[in-house]
Amino acid sequence: MDFSIDARVEGYRSRVRAFVDRELIPLESEPAAYDAHGNIGLDHLEQMRARARAEGLWCLQLKPETGGAGLDKVGMAVCYEEMNRSIFGPVVFNAAAPDDGNMMLLEKIATPAQRERWLAPIVAGEVRSAFAMTEPHPGGGSDPSMISTSARREGDRYVVSGRKWFITGAEDAAHFILMARTSDDARKGLTAFLFHKDQPGWTIVRRIPIMGPEEHGGHCELAFDGLEVPAENVLLSEGQGLKVTQIRLGPARLTHCMRWLGLSKRCVEIARAYAAERRGFGVRLADRESVQLMLGDLAMRIEVGRLLVMKAAWELDRGSFARKEVSMAKVHVANLLHAAADTAIQINGARGYSKDTVLEWIYRYARQARLVDGADEVHKMVLNRFLEAEEDAFWTWPAPGATAAGPA
């Protein structure tokens, strides 16, 4: 087993790290750099994006012919971890959700005409995008088979009716990928559509207030009442919506984990720096065994997360959906992020609870990690299905010519 990375990936990693240290971490200390929802303000964002482009650090995850650097998933894991050492990082490099997952999906499955119309403007940074799947009860959430938003075929177009909610980035998005039901078939009943914000027949009902800082465009509730989508704007073909979700959501869940590892490492950096200088009762915090145990445990858990993410990335690069590996990484890293923020705040004391550091920002953000792209419990059920199907083979190392069973 070879855990080394090649020189090209290391080159990008070191350049991303230098950019984050030089440009983004200092910016986090400027109150004027934030918008009203706790994210980087658009003026500052455009400046930083221009600098990232100029340094060749734009859309590293996409193919060169699409406008990126052609990194595979392993290379992305290395670089995304560095990007999100800053809370502003991913969006500056055009590697933030939901645009990140949408771009990779469209690059993979869209027709040439669809890529030109719907993908190219996102890659250029001219527009933002959203992925509209989750619905209020009794509609679909983690279980896409429950999706109730419908798309009725009428001639050369589909007419959409229904409701979505917690759609990340919707308020600022121009391009949308929409999941809707076109039949009652258990496996071929969903279809993926592309639509533009200026099309009539849909509205943003509200931007849902949330506990943590928000991505640009928030998390919105949408209502569809007669949105007409031309048949040419179907992704893949009618009835292939479930396949579209599988192609998009597995890698997207893993890219969350890649970024969360960066935030976890940033928490440790802040905690270690403070512990090294803060003294109490004649002793540095860093010299107290209790603090050493806390930081050592976090270091170990971060490394476990990195190994889980790397294995899942390697599986994706081999052409697998890596459902088992992604689920394990998702559960571990989501919980790790919350623990890292909590521990760092504890070591920093009142300073950590204040806005003098980004720890309170990360802490509020971290709670969503155990919910987005499938709650912990859903992923653990997925893992149990694999265990039931594979039994002892659940832990088998890949070997030439070997095949593994999987859950139905």
Image (cartoon, rainbow, N blue to C red):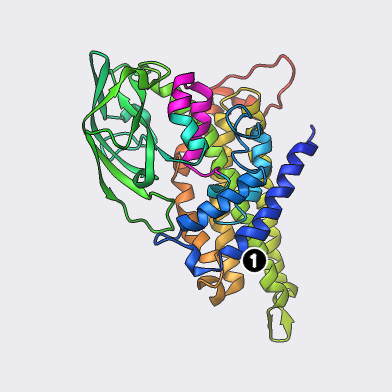
Q: Above or below — where is 54 with respect to 142? A: below
Regarding residue 89, the answer to whether it shows in the image is no
Check disc 1 and give the amino acid type. Ile
Q: Residue at x 50, y 55 (%)?
A: 366
Q: Position of residue 270 (x, y in %)?
A: 64, 66
Q: Residue at x 69, y 52 (%)?
A: 17
Question: Judging from the image, what secondary structure is the residue with disc 1 in?
Answer: helix
Residue 285 relative to residue 375: left or right = right
Q: Which residue is mark 1?
A: 270
Q: Position of residue 262 (x, y in %)?
A: 62, 52
Regarding residue 262, the answer to whether it shows in the image is yes
**Residue at the farthest bottom position:** 281
Say which of 303 and 33 sits in front. Answer: 33
Q: Residue at x 22, y 33 (%)?
A: 201
From which residue to which does the magenta span run? 94-117
Q: Quadrant of residue 170?
A: top left
Q: Position of residue 358 (x, y in %)?
A: 55, 65
* Image quarter of the N terminus: top right
Q: Quadrant of residue 322?
A: top right
